[in-house]
Image (cartoon, rainbow, N blue to C red):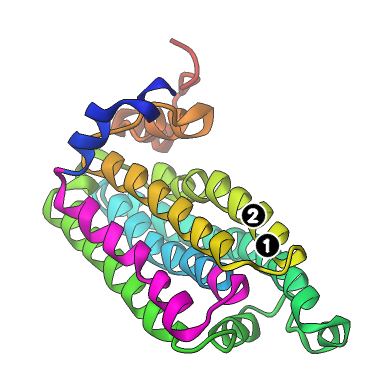
């Protein structure tokens, strides 16, 4: 946690090209706020759609890392992908429903009846309609996620040191803390009338978290991943997954 205030850490993080690219994408919504009059609603719905994009990019990661273990690994990867689509999709629908519930405070109670709750396609369409050119920002996010997938996972060979189990769980650890903060911050902004300074602060918070996340991908971890990410890191060991495939006893990754 002390590294959060370590200038040396931030200096090392900002030497990574992928961190600068991510930072540029994360700060793009500032233009939406200043030039297009975005308030908190399109901003948090954009971040919600980012969850969907991250989930979609996780599916090929699960399948490819599974295929690296052979035919059985590929089969398990496909099965895990199907489970992931259902579980992660449900997770995102519930999260999006709460966010749209907050949006009714700015649109008026009558908007509640028109909200496409628990309808992923309808929620996506609603998110794209919350502000001018939200789709442009979404395309930038998709482009960045594709770059991460191609450069970090395929070209740099991240798939060689991972497995379907670790890939399936990884997105949850990356978004739970961040989006809990966004959820609380967005709710407060909507109730307080969405002052611009608060909306911009939300973007800055997201950008700082993006630097931490992308620096971790590039081998400059902050070091306070917590129990969830620590467990994911340990089960990414290929031997762990190979034992699980063979039905052998697997040691608890939380034990030394």
Magenta segment's dominant SS is helix
* C-alpha span from label 1 to label 2: 6 Å
The question of residue 46 being in magenta is answered with no
The span shown in magenta is 15-43
Q: Position of residue 108 (x, y in %)?
A: 83, 82
Which residue appears at 20% of the width and 35% of the height? 11
Residue with the mark numbered 1: 189
Residue 122: x and y, percent? 64, 86
Counting from the top left corner in percent of width and height, residue 96 is at: 66, 68
Q: Residue 41 lies in magenta, yes or no?
A: yes
CB atoms of marks 1 and 2 within 8 Å? yes
Q: Quadrant of the N terminus?
A: top left
Residue 153 visible in this rendered orientation of the protein:
no
- Mark drawn on residue 185: 2
- When the figure is inspected, residue 187 is found, relative to residue 119, above or below; the finding is above
- In the rendered structure, the answer to whether residue 47 lies left or right of residue 65 reads right
**189 or 249, which lies in front?**
189
Residue 239 lies, with reference to residue 105, above or below; the image says above
Circle 1 SS class: helix
Between 55 and 102, which is closer to the camera in this rendering?
102
**Which residue is drawn at the image coordinates 78% and 77% (left, top)?**
104
* Whether residue 46 is situated above or below residue 112 in the rendered picture: above
Which label is found at residue 197? none
Q: Residue at x 42, y 52 (%)?
A: 76
Q: Residue at x 14, y 43 (%)?
A: 15
Q: Secondary structure at mark 2?
A: helix
**Label 2: few (<14), some or many (≥20) within 10 Å?**
some
Quadrant (top left, top right, bottom left, bottom right) of the C terminus: top left
Label 1, residues with CA under 10 Å away: few <14, some 14-19, many ≥20: many
Q: Eyeballing the image, is 99 above or below 154?
A: below
């Amino acid at each position: 946690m002390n590294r959060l205030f370590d200038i040396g850490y931030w200096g090392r993080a900002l030497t990574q090209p992928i961190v600068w690219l991510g930072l540029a994408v994360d700060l793009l919504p500032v233009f939406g706020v200043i030039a297009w009059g975005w308030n908190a609603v399109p901003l948090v719905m954009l971040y919600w759609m980012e969850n969907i994009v991250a989930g979609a990019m996780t599916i090929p990661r699960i399948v490819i890392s599974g295929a690296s273990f052979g035919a059985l690994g590929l089969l398990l990867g496909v099965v895990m992908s199907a489970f992931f689509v259902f579980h992660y999709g449900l997770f995102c629908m519930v999260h999006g429903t709460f966010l749209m519930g907050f949006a009714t405070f700015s649109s008026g109670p009558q908007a509640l009846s028109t909200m496409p709750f628990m309808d992923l396609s309808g929620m996506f369409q609603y998110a794209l309609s919350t502000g001018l050119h939200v789709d442009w920002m979404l395309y930038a996010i998709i482009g960045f996620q594709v770059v991460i997938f191609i450069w970090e996972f395929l070209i740099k060979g991240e798939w060689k040191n991972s497995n379907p189990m670790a890939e399936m769980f990884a997105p949850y650890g990356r978004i739970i803390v961040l989006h809990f903060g966004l959820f609380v911050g967005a709710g407060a902004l909507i109730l307080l009338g969405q002052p611009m300074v608060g909306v911009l602060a939300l973007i800055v918070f997201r950008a700082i978290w993006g630097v931490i996340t992308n620096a971790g991908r590039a081998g400059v971890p902050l070091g306070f991943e917590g129990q969830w990410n620590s467990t994911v890191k340990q089960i990414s060991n290929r031997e762990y997954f190979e034992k699980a495939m063979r039905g052998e006893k697997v040691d608890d990754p939380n034990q030394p």
